[in-house]
Amino acid sequence: MTTKNTVCVIGAGPSGMMAAITAARCGASVVVLEKKRRPGMKLRITGKGRCNFTNACDKSVFIENVPGNGRFLHSALAALSPESLISFFEELGVRSVVERGGRVFPASGLSNEIVSALMLELQRCGVDLRLGWKVTSLSAGEHGGFRISSVNRPDTGCDCAVLATGGITYPQTGSTGDGYALLKAAGHRIVDPRPSLVPLHSDAPWIPRLQGLSLRNVNAALTVDGERVEEQFGEMLFTDAGLSGPIILTLSRAAVRSIDEGKRVWVSIDLKPALDKETLDERLVRDLAEWSRKSVKAVLTGALPRLLVRVFAERWAVDVDRRCAQVTRDERKRMVDLLKDFTVPISGYGALEEAVVTQGGVDVREIDPTSMESRLVKGLYVCGEVLDVDGYTGGFNLHIAFATGFVAGRSAALRVST
């Protein structure tokens, strides 16, 4: 049975809770259906439990950091900018700090503070939060509105529905792609969901020997079928299975798509990005001459992290116990080449449990960006990670969830009030 002026939000993640709070503040009667026993499960673990909830940058920079349909966000960012989101949480008692790269965190460093603030505001606004409600279908009601069916629960009627079910990453938190099936049944096209911001795997035999090695201030370039397609500067990490760290996660979006298409993928690491080849060669000439009586290992130890020395020497094909004076011109040139282009073949990528966000989802051409309303089903609003919109690390993805949830909740409340 449909209750007058009711908005039903499916999913209690960041976008769903924001949609519910906004709709309730605008005067709507709001019900939230969440299949897990705790709301905000994924939100609790973001940013390694610190919750990087936005990025303190302007709109143009923000959109540049959203390679997945960033232009779709113009209206959402105008409605809820990073500055506005920071103020929203301050009003709820959450102070924030801005760190490197514009990343914004709660000052406490605890993601649970964000979740608790949202839950308290849901309660204050009179939102009916129903936990343990797994939605199985969404259909048009007999007298308008929608009828929502859930496992072992009575049907829920509403005038408007907001779908905020998340993507497919971190499925243990409840993001198992439920919304894709609901939207597909409603006639929407779903762009194949894939993990993004995920570690990359390599089958190179020397990779496990570099496990735990962190490299800072390096340049990593993604090469696909011999063509350099993207590069990033910053920090990366070797794992037992391949590569991870901020710049690798950023490159992973394009890498995942290329791997799935059966293309040959490599990551090229410039270990000395501050020096061009000519300058680097001149420096090596001086170092080899100065250390002429010492072993090659001594020079490599001074130039590279300890864990990398043996692997580098093997790929260079020079005995580390040789004297520096015995290094030939061709060997020195090969060393320069390897320092500037330390290649890692990529054979795959991490599991959904390791990915930060989903790329793919409901085709944004079927969603009105000014309201988040479906262009196919009136009264149905879509927000958060279920949309085919995804950004890089740095708080962009969480802000996308909050901003699209804000617009969806406001629009749904406006519709039920008219």
Image (cartoon, rainbow, N blue to C red):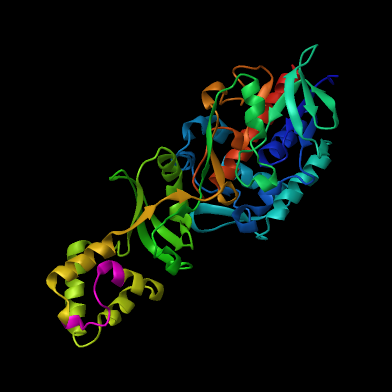
* x 59%, y 42%: residue: 399
Quadrant location, the N terminus? top right
Using the rendered view, name the quadrant where residue 415 is placed: top right
* x 26%, y 63%: residue: 338
Residue reaching furthest to the left: 329
Which of the pair 416/137 is nearer the observer?
Answer: 137
Question: Any magenta on residue 322?
Answer: yes
Q: Where is residue 249 in the image (x, y as percent from the top left)?
A: 47, 51
* x 28%, y 59%: residue: 341
Looking at the image, residue 164 lies above or below residue 230: above
Quadrant location, the C terminus? top right
Which of the pair 370/36 is nearer the observer?
Answer: 36
Using the rendered view, name the quadrant where residue 12 is placed: top right
Which residue range is magenta in the image? 313-325
Q: Position of residue 183 (x, y in %)?
A: 64, 25
Q: Is residue 242 left or right of residue 44?
A: left
Question: Any magenta on residue 236?
Answer: no
Looking at the image, residue 211 lies above or below residue 405: below
Q: In this view, does 143 lie to the left or right of 347?
A: right
Q: Where is residue 107 in the image (x, y as percent from the top left)?
A: 65, 59
Q: Where is residue 24 in the image (x, y as percent from the top left)?
A: 77, 32
Q: How many labels does the image show?
A: 0
Q: Is residue 392 left or right of residue 79?
A: left
Q: Is residue 363 left or right of residue 258?
A: right
Residue 175 makes an appearance in the image = yes
Which of the pair 21/298 is nearer the observer?
Answer: 298
Which of the pair 75/15 is nearer the observer?
Answer: 15
